[in-house]
Image (cartoon, rainbow, N blue to C red):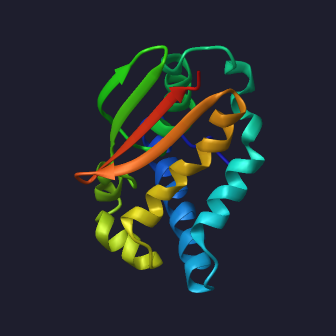
Amino acid sequence: MPELKVSKDILLDGAQMSLAATTAAIAGFLKERNIPIKDFVAYMGDNFEGMLGDMEGRGADEVMEHLLKLEVLPMGAEIVSSKMTPDTAEVTLTALPPQKVLEKFGTSSKDFLEGFGVTQKEFASIYESYAPAAKAIGMTFRHHSRDSQEVLTLERKH
């Protein structure tokens, strides 16, 4: 079979759509079977608790940048604003799943999420899986929605 040439942009869009679909499908599956989505998020967080181990002793700003680069931005979220210091990092993001990717696949966030039977809030709860890893390195992680955006906060415990 001849080599298939695919641009990195198309691969990234496809990967983000696949990740969004898998996340929404898991949430919908759990919800349909009356299994709390928060239980899955806690399970995932507990199993990835050590993922920030090499960041211990670093500032909240460095740890947040690490999370953004390796975990959050690859999902398709985009940074709207950020305030970062070594003690506190707060980042406001576009909502997931990423609208610009969904549009390329001919759907909207509302239709996509409704197809799996989940709400935007349920879908965004995946961010809570970072809390155990932050706690393991002496930080507190919080997530909340505000004005159709997602806010991630990371603070050093003193």
Res. 107 visible in picture: no
Tally of numbered discs: 0
Q: Observer-nearest residue: 45 or 85? A: 85
- For the view shown, which residue lies furthest in the front direction? 158
Q: Is residue 84 left or right of residue 54?
A: left
Q: Where is residue 71 in the image (x, y as percent from the top left)?
A: 56, 37
Residue 115 visible in image: yes
**Can you say whether 31 is above or below 1 in the image?**
below
Front position in the image: 90 or 54: 90
Residue situated in front as seen by the camera: 6 or 156: 156
Q: Nearer the viewer, residue 5 or 85?
A: 85
Direction from residue 71 to residue 149 in the image, left or right: left
Name the residue: 51% across, 28% down.
155
Residue 102, horizontal then vertical, whole percent? 34, 58
Identify which residue is drawn at 73% across, 20% down: 54
Percent x, y for residue 104? Answer: 31, 55
The answer to which quarter of the image holds residue 113 is bottom left
Furthest toward the bottom, the residue is 33
